Amino acid sequence: MTNLNSFTTRFPDAKVLEQNEKLLFVEIGDLKLLVAVGFLMENGFGRLISLGGADYQDRMEGIYHFGRYDGKPDIIALKVKIPKSLPVLPSIAKLIPGANWHERETYDLLGIKFEGHPDLARIFLPADFPGYPLRKDWHGEDTVPLLFGDDSGEPPTNLIEKKIYNE
């Protein structure tokens, strides 16, 4: 892809949110995501810079940033709106293996599920952690303090209650 306009030519339904000589930021539908990622990879934008999400009052979004491996600073960012009641996106981990952990992190903290992911499990929080802490409807009082253990064989302790520093 010699210029960023090739993307908007291929995907005329994409809503351009921002564009300059180095950046194209577009909104696409969830059904076009895999086709768009394939198109980006075929045209030199196979480097996944970041993948995450956002939670708004009325919807959630998946946000993807793609760059080039040839050193050119061009970036194409994709935003995909999804309903808050059913936060599901297709996984791109089979196209870009590096997306695996990004998708797991987004699932772990926001609750966005990635359909077709090879192992969509929590990556930071315990498997039984209640809720998704980056969602607007999550409240910390729904949880219990995390307990941390070490290799000493002693039962885990809450490090907040343990004096770590000498006063």
Image (tube, rainbow, N blue to C red):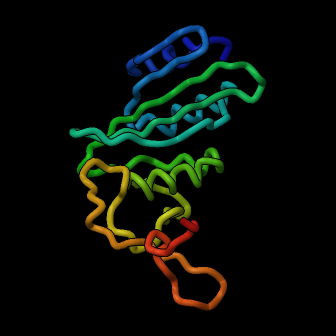
Q: Residue furthest top?
A: 21
Q: In this view, does 155 lie to the left or right of 130?
A: right
Q: Which of 120 and 57 is in front in this view?
A: 57
Could you say where residue 105 lies in the image, as x and y percent from the top left? 50, 54
* Residue drawn at x 54%, y 9% as measured from the top left: 20
> Seen in the image, is 120 located left or right of residue 143?
right
Identify the image quadrant of the N terminus. top right
| Count of number-bearing discs | 0
**Please, which residue is most extreme toward the right here?**
70
Q: For the point 67% across and 35% down, which residue is it?
A: 47
Name the residue at 36% across, 56% down: 133
Residue 46 location (% of width, % of height):
67, 34
Q: Residue 15: x and y, percent?
A: 38, 19
- Comparing 131 with 81, the one in front is 131
In the displayed structure, 64 sits above or below 84; it is above
Image height check: is 5 above or below 82?
above
Residue at point 49%, 16% (across, down): 8
Q: In this view, does 13 lie to the left or right of 21?
A: left
Screen quadrant of the C terminus: bottom right
Where does the image place residue 70, in percent across and percent down from the top left? 78, 24
Residue 39 found in image quarter: top right
